[in-house]
Amino acid sequence: MRLPRTLGVESSCDETAAAVLDGEGGVESQLLSSQVQIHRRWGGVVPEVASREHLVAIRPVVEAVLDRAGGPPELVAVTDGPGLVGALLVGVRFAAAFAWALDLPLVRVDHLEGHLASPFLFLDGRPARPMPPRVLSLVASGGHSSWYAVEEGAARRLCRTRDDAAGEAFDKLAQVLGLPYPGGPVVDRIARSGDADAVPLPLPRIKANPDDFSFSGLKSAAVRWVRARGLEGAGEGGGQAVADLLASFEKAVVDQLLRPLPGLVKRVRPVVLAVAGGVAANTRLRHSLVAAGEELGVEVLLPPPALTTDNAAMIARAGQLAFARGVRHDVRRVDARGRTAWQPPGMRRAS
Ligand code: KG4
Ligand code: ZN
């Protein structure tokens, strides 16, 4: 079935992104304006700054993708949550006004549903891969770490982190070491030259649901190790000791993320295994998941690295698939679904 050419808009965190997909889910154009350099000096995303930057970027970004698209859009898809409320509002209001002015249908998309669609997309114009009836997907990003069963388009969460997200754990350890934000890509690079068995780190057991993860104890153990050796703020000059710690930390995170996999495969009997979110760019996670897929006899789908972080192609695709299922939203009623709580960098919750 040919679906409408779709404009996707994403502004839930610190990337202003737009994309146009053709009727088969092929990416015609996509663009991302990242605020990473701006937030770097605070060591994390500052919501008010993010909203203002979205306001500046949204129009030129959307205009640029429309200029490079194969034709005018017939559907608008926009992330309405979860995310930073002010940041989301910019995208939601822009998309709703755009759809209303051109009399186009609008679909609001959950950011997580977008990530779940990303492993099925290509960046070379090829049509999107149809979603098989049962997919087992890991979403690991700065805000989420959960396994989902995606069945007939509906996602069911199977297990999750009890505290920090995997990307957040990488970011926090990197910050203590004086490495630039976001920490994940730097940790990935430095860990390649480290020995992953050099530093013993704890592997927690969670009583409530043994499939769940916990990264806060691991992070504290790693931070204690750094402090005991006076390596706080060592930055790139941390040498082999830091490379070994980061390799061991990365292995501990990946091992936890993949620990429930055999049991989940037995329960869900997926046609494919997939991974999405910023941490899906991680070299060790990608290799380990492919190896696990071979062992378990299930095909593994990895998103193109450029589509692992927040992007609008995945939002457009999720919107397109929802539209095919009959989903439509009233442009006058869409609104941002923000996070309930946000802590400024370096601050702790009172209780
Ligand atoms: O999906 P994303 O762009 O934004 C959220 O929705 O959170 O994910 C960003 C997260 C950051 O925490 C970043 O450090 C992490 O993904 N990340 C990585 C890598 N690239 C990005 N973590 C580990 N290895 C990487 N190569
Ligand atoms: Zn995301």
Image (spheres, rainbow, N blue to C red):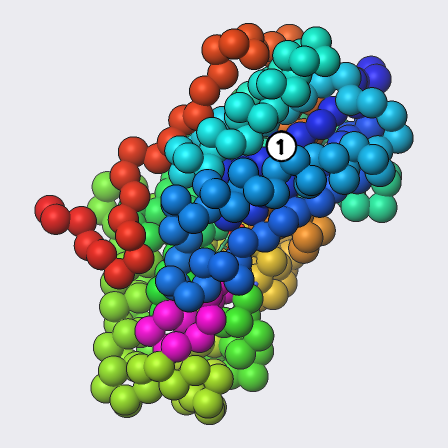
Residue 93, compared with residue 68, is above or below; it is above
Q: What residue lies at 47% left-to-right and 33% top-to-bottom?
A: 88
Q: Is residue 220 or residue 347 the one in the foreground?
A: 347
Q: Residue furthest right?
A: 70
Q: Could you tell me which quadrant the N terminus lies in?
A: top right
- Residue 49 seen in render: yes
Which residue is identified by label 1?
A: 9
Q: What residue lies at 30% left-to-right and 43% top-to-bottom?
A: 342
The amino acid beneath tag 1 is Val
Q: What residue lies at 57% left-to-right and 62% top-to-bottom?
A: 282
Number of marks present in the image shown: 1
Q: What residue lies at 51% left-to-right and 32% top-to-bottom?
A: 90
> Where in the figure is residue 297, as x and y percent of width and height?
66, 48
Residue 314 horizontal side relative to residue 238, left or right: right
Question: Which quadrant of the figure has residue 252?
Answer: bottom left
> Where in the figure is residue 82, as x and y percent of width and height?
43, 33
Within 8 Å: ligand 2 and the Cβ of disc 1? no
> Where in the figure is residue 221, as x and y percent of width and height?
26, 72
**Residue range (magenta):** 174-184
Residue 63 horizontal side relative to residue 47, left or right: right
Residue 159, compared with residue 22, is above or below; it is below
